[in-house]
Amino acid sequence: MNFPLPHPGLALAPASPQFINRYNASDHGRPGAARELADGLNAVAASVSPKYFYDALGSQLFEAITLLDEYYPTRTEAGIFDAAHGHMAAALAGAGITRPCLIDLGAGSCAKAMRLIPHLQPRQYVPVDISVDFLRDAAEQVQNTFPELAIVGVGMDFSAALVLPPQVQRQDRVFFYPGSSIGNFSPDQALAFLQRIADPAQGAARGLLLGIDLVKDKATLEAAYDDALGVTAAFNKNLLRHVNTLLGADFDPHQWRHVALFNEAQSRIEMHLEACCELTVHWPKGERRFGMGERIHTESSYKYTLDSMSALLRLAGFSQIKPWADPKDWFAVFWASV
Ligand code: AVJ
């Protein structure tokens, strides 16, 4: 972009965050999204991608989840960052990275990066998220807190491809993928995603800071996804409202029940929406009948061990793999360099 200078030679104030939108709410409305949603609903085992949780309300509900007593990942991870940020900065320095370009995948409120920025001293901060308006506000907050920091906000769906706009510095890219968000991918998809981060033609990462949720007892895991206040239930059901908007469907959230369970064989939490009665959902080019008790699979959240994630990172082409965990081994943050 080329802005005419108000007066030639007059110094401009530090730029407010640049923002590049490669995604907007109407993308969801494009035939691609409608087809993806309809295909998922028509499948014998119905499903909707968890990326459709995150409309404006969904993003706020997720923020509320992170404050729940039962939802340990966010605060446990924050504790790991507080305890180990010195070691993390040293790991970057050991890989020859002093002023990283910090690329925050699924940045959301940017709260996690804000705690890390003073320690990692990035030359550029690049928050990336699918929830564009939420991200735009968050990037402004970051700029208010760090007026001198160069910020390039990017609205995009990085689950499909990871090609960043040219405004993003190529040198010393460190990807920040906290919160166990990688758990939404199956292990095969996670491997492919990690390979894209490392790929010189795509993410071109020098390093990666990755937060992952660890396997633990079933009761603790299931409570984290089925809290007493019902916030996670609201988060799950909000997806139906979002699908109504995107697809023009007529889901009635009253008719659906939140289900969360730990599938031990697959090492994943599954969230479903279960029909409370026999019902039919309609949308402009289709409909689907659901029997009572029939489910829509809305999310899988895979849980790893330190060994299984180390192996996956190595397979993806990373080396110098180092995890930090909390004292209970509930959560881990990995450093891995390319
Ligand atoms: C954002 C994918 C990391 O799996 O724990 C929280 C989403 N779903 N409660 C997770 C989520 C229900 C969260 N991730």
Image: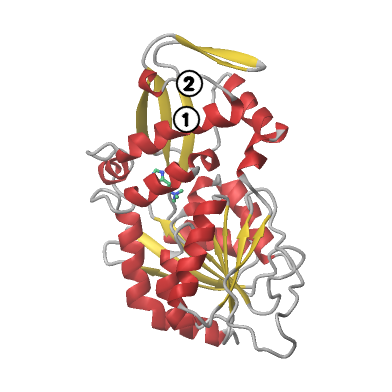
Dot 1 and dot 2 residues touching (CB under 8 Å): yes
Residue located 42% across and 66% down the image: 112
218 relative to 152 in the view: left or right? left
Disc 1 is placed on an element classified as helix
Instruction: In the rendered structure, find residue 336 and report the number of the disc placed on it.
Output: none
What residue is shown at x 68% (from left), y 89% (from top)? 10
The three-letter code of the residue at mark 1 reads Arg
In the figure, 9 relative to 144: above or below?
A: below
Q: Which residue is located at x 31 percent, y 66 percent?
A: 326
Pointer 2 local density, CA inside 10 Å: few below 14, some 14–19, many at least 20: many
Question: Residue 262, can we see it?
Answer: no
Task: Residue at 54%, 87% (x, y): give it.
Answer: 93
Is the N terminus in the top left, top right, bottom left or bottom right quadrant?
bottom right
Q: Amino acid at mark 2?
A: Phe
Would you say residue 274 is visible in this rendering?
A: yes
- Asked if the beta carbon under badge 2 is closer than 8 A to the nearest atom of ligand 1, the reply is no
Task: From the top left corner, tell me how far across and down residue 269 is, in percent.
Answer: 40, 40
- Viewer-proximal residue among 331 and 133: 133
Q: Residue 205: horizontal and vertical position, in percent?
A: 65, 70
Q: Which residue is mark 1?
A: 241
Q: Is 17 placed left or right of 63 in the picture? A: right
State whether residue 239 is above or below residue 206.
above
Residue labelled with disc 2: 251
72 or 134, nearer to the observer: 134
Return the disc, 1 or 2, that comes first in the chain's sequence. 1
Q: Which one is nearer the viewer's eye here, 135 or 288?
A: 135
